[in-house]
Image (cartoon, rainbow, N blue to C red):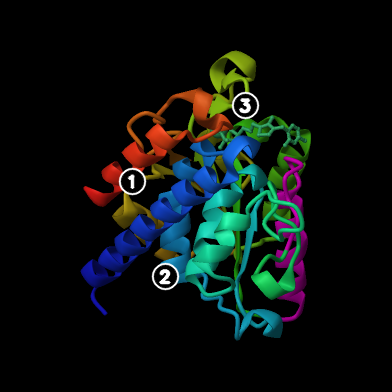
Amino acid sequence: MSTDTKINNIKSLKKKLLKNVVDTAYYAGASSAHIGGALSCIDIVSTLFTEFIKINPENFSKKDRDYFILSKGHACLVYYAVLAELGFFSRDDLKSFEKTDSFLLGHPILNEKYGIDFSTGSLGMGLSIGIGLAISLKKKKSENKVYVIIGDGECNEGSIWEGMMSAPHFNLDNLTIIIDKNNLQQTGKNEDIMSLGDLKSKISSFGWDAHSIDGHNIKDLYDIFSQKTDSKPKAIVANTIKGKGLSFAENNNKFHHTVLTKALYEKALKEIESK
Ligand SMILES: Cc1ncc(C[n+]2csc(CCOP(=O)(O)OP(=O)(O)O)c2C)c(N)n1
Ligand SMILES: [Mg+2]
């Protein structure tokens, strides 16, 4: 398959995910939903699950496969969106998001039947989980890989920096982390709350194979995920826009966690249709 075809496949999944995300946010009603942080990593998730993380309901329980950890678990709308497309449950199930007795909670809960390996939502845990998993895969001489998406605000957590130190120590070239650098967190700008400085240089100084790219450029994402690293873990600082894809939500932190009104839902559907 040519690279152009692969890129087109990624773009077509992305459009489906966009629709699933806004549908789910709308079904959530008054429960509200984390919209902005789901949209900032939608290109990353689309690229990973089209080309790199080959999971499906048939191979999931076999464990001989790659692993994904959404460390910024509040962005679960995009996770549920892709799991529905992969056939772990139906698009109709997305309507149950945040409802009583639903398996689709406001943060992902470990659920082997529905494709979720790890519970996340308490920020700062996913990198350490990924490191433990990557070490165990190495010990088993498995070729499988571990991918972790981390928020930039999440990098305020000290545990992230312990992980930054330890992954190169264990030569985890089977581990890739993607930092969704949308410059915002729950209560404002990272720059005001806890500036991160030059993330790529910092992470590189810890011994990672570190890169900084446009997190909405699918070709760049595809190329960087395709590159092999030799004995170093890979870190991708993905420069993104919170709320990307919906004009009214882009860079607007009101959409960190909010209700998607009927009027905005209809506007969103029109915008997605025109893409
Ligand atoms: C340990 C912990 N502290 C606080 C929160 C509340 N919280 C939820 S989202 C969020 C902001 C996260 O910012 P970022 O990682 O940048 O996510 P994004 O901008 O992609 O939404 C916070 C503080 C949490 N989920 N876990
Ligand atoms: Mg952020």
Q: Earlier in the sequence, mark 3 or mark 2?
A: 2
Residue 115, image x and y in percent?
Answer: 65, 70
Magenta-colored span: 118-141
Residue 153, image x and y in percent?
Answer: 62, 31
Disc 3 crowd rating (10 Å Cα; few below 14, some 14-19, many 20+) is some
Q: Residue at x 60, y 72 (%)?
A: 66
Q: Can residue 230 be spotted in the picture?
A: no
Q: Can residue 115 be spotted in the picture?
A: yes
Q: Residue at x 52, y 39 (%)?
A: 35
Give the structural element (helix, strand or loop) at label 3. loop
Q: Which residue is mark 2?
A: 51
Q: Which residue is mark 3?
A: 186
Residue closest to the eye, 259 or 202:
259
Ligand 2 located in image quadrant: top right
Judge whether residue 135 is colored magenta.
yes
Give the structural element (helix, strand or loop) at label 1. helix
Q: Amino acid at mark 1?
A: Leu
Q: Amino acid at mark 2?
A: Glu
Q: In the figure, is residue 161 to the left or right of 14?
A: right
- The number of discs equals 3
Q: Residue at x 78, y 40 (%)?
A: 159
